[in-house]
Amino acid sequence: MNAALARAKANPWLVALVVSLATFMEVLDTTITNVSLSHIAGSLAASQEESTWVLTSYLVSNGIVLPLSGWLGQVLGRKRYFVFCIAGFTLASFFCGAATSLPMLIGFRLLQGIAGGGLQPTQQAIIMDAFPPEKRGAVFGLTGLTLIMAPALGPTLGGWITDNFSWRWIFFINIPVGIIAALLVMQLVEDPPHAVRRGLKQLDVIGLGLVVIGLGALQIALDKGQQEDWFESNFIVLMSALCVASIAGAVWWLWRQKEPIIDLHLLQNRQYAISCGLIFLTGFALYASNALIPLLVQSQLGYDATLAGLVLSPGAACLAFLMPVVGKLVSKVPPPRLIRIGLLLGMTGMIYTSYLSPTIDYHTLVLMRVVQVLGLPFMFIPVSTMAFSKIPPERSGKASAFFALARNMGGSIGIALVITYLARHTQMRQHVLSEHLVPGDPVYDARVQLITQAAQAHGMAPAEAAHQATGQIYQELMRQASFLAYHDSFLFLAVLMGLAFIATFFLPKMTMGKGNSAAAAGAH
């Protein structure tokens, strides 16, 4: 069948917009609850630690379904599966908002993650079939808006809704969006011949079980690792052992199957494999920086949830402008060159953000965030375009699923590593600074004397004034140590991106493969 006839009957840009609307809703929910956990815990009579399972349950179920979505799309038919995911996500959102206990909310978040896990990769597969290879760079700018802007806007929107209404509305707002998206998808999207329903001929129970256990254990270990002190906890050791054993077993098993639920043979395409590695790094940088900034401004600068989110929002607006610009550049500038520009801009942004101080103001923080994200479009769009340029249409569903898994795994591992790095370096900086805060040190003694005299001048007894002086100095030590640890963490991300920048010069030549992709598409 001619490639043009196989594509959607509706305007492909309208199709791309509709499927991106559904995906935006789902990706938004990965971060929208982050700033609302204390409100959820208080409302449902749960502890702060227990409430974090609201995040973990979603990430675990979502991460498990992501790589399976290509196979599920083949079983059910891509359009039918996409509509099923939207409907399931919308219904689960309603029950999340109506939950009357924490276990109930966690259960519905699991269902929400299962339904939502298929949206990202299926969206990308639908868009790939709706556009010819030479136009995918521009449309990947649109998908980039959903996958990069949504995590940045989540804390802002979640904080504003929670502060002004109720945490329940962070789930209820999905209902009208989901209904509209489902109706439009049913009306506009058409399955090409290679994406129609094949049915379930044989279920690979072993492969499915190994993938579910391995990815589930990995997500739990990453999310709870720092909280449980990593391998000092028997629980984390157990999850890690399960993860390693199950994923190793899954790789061995899936590689030997003719019709695997996850097609690892895609990685034999060197350009696709390298692109998966680069999108992993993009997810790492995006989600790690998304986690650090709200934590910094809320814990050290006293910002509320809404203001913390507003620090990220101007960066998202900047992305909205840059995405279509870079999308047009992809067809004119070699993608590896754009990727190097992105890495260099990202490294520069992380170095700039490392210059933090306790007196930093809101506008400087916003500028730092904007500089941080300038490089993301130069990474996301060329990498996405290169990844699928040599993938035949009949394998696009599974290729999109694995690509989405690489990005999300980058985000999960990035958050886990950078939060652990921050905690360890906070302790290290406290230890170094405390070595100078001892009686006999001239600077320390002068500071204690100054604070003591000021307190006595306000009528405080000498002993109490001296006690207050040491307390204030200790608090300042903790504050300085925290800022230095944030400085170290942003430099860590800068070094990582710098190493990736150097590594790009040793990569094999990568092309867009227009001829191959066009021929493959025409064959269907």
Image (cartoon, helix red, strand yellow):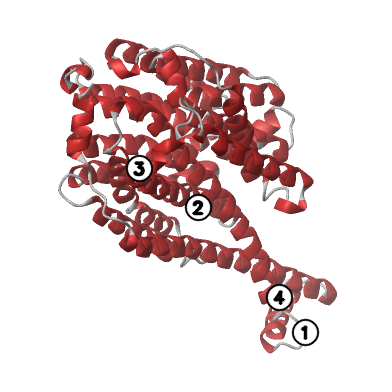
Q: Quadrant of the N terminus?
A: top left
Mark 1 or 3, which is nearer the eye?
3
Question: Label 2 sits on what residue type?
Answer: Ile
Residue at image location 50% in from the left, 20% down from the top: 89
Residue located beneath label 4 in the image: 434
Inter-mark Cα distance, 4 to 3: 53 Å
Residue at image location 24% in from the left, 24% down from the top: 130
Q: Residues within 10 Å of mark 1 (few under 14, many from 20)?
A: few
Inter-mark Cα distance, 1 to 4: 11 Å
Residue located beneath label 1 in the image: 439
Residue located beneath label 2 in the image: 293
Tag 2, which secondary structure?
Answer: helix
Residue located beneath label 3 in the image: 269
Tag 3, which secondary structure?
Answer: loop
Question: Label 4 sits on what residue type?
Answer: Ser
Q: Position of residue 55 (x, y in %)?
A: 60, 35
Q: Position of residue 454 (x, y in %)?
A: 70, 76
Mark 4 or 3, which is nearer the eye?
3
